[in-house]
Image (cartoon, rainbow, N blue to C red):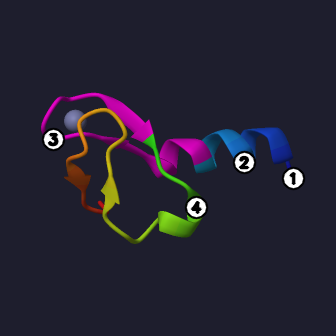
């Protein structure tokens, strides 16, 4: 059990790259399986 490492890997799983502008955004765990509006360009990013 390495909680810190587990937290890091969770963040990587929740990270999505915007298809429109190519920037990365970390998605909230509650939105993991939903398309989320990207905060910079407002394009929707579908779940991987
Ligand atoms: Zn974008």
Q: Which of the two residues, 12 or 46, is positioned nearer the viewer here?
A: 46
Label 2 SS = helix
Which quadrant holds residue 21?
A: top left
Looking at the image, do the residues carrying marks 1 and 2 touch, with CB atoms under 8 Å apart?
Answer: yes
Residue at the (81%, 39%) spot, across then down: 4
Q: Which of labels 2 and 4 is toward the front? A: 4
In the picture of the structure, the residue carrying the numbered disc 1 is 1
For the C terminus, the quadrant is bottom left
In the picture of the structure, the residue carrying the numbered disc 3 is 19
The verdict on residue 3 being magenta is no
Dot 2: within a 10 Å radius of its alpha carbon, few (fewer than 14), some, or many (20 or more) residues?
few
In the picture of the structure, the residue carrying the numbered disc 2 is 6
Q: Which of the two residues, 7 or 16, is positioned nearer the viewer here?
A: 16
Pinpoint residue 17: horizontal percent, then vertical percent.
Answer: 29, 38
Looking at the image, do the residues carrying marks 3 and 2 touch, with CB atoms under 8 Å apart?
Answer: no
Residue at the (37%, 70%) spot, across then down: 34
């Amino acid at each position: 059990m390495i909680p810190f490492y587990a937290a890091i890997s969770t963040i990587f799983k929740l990270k999505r790259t915007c298809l429109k502008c190519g920037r990365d955004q970390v998605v909230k765990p509650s939105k993991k399986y939903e398309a989320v509006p990207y905060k910079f360009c407002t394009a929707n990013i579908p779940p991987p």
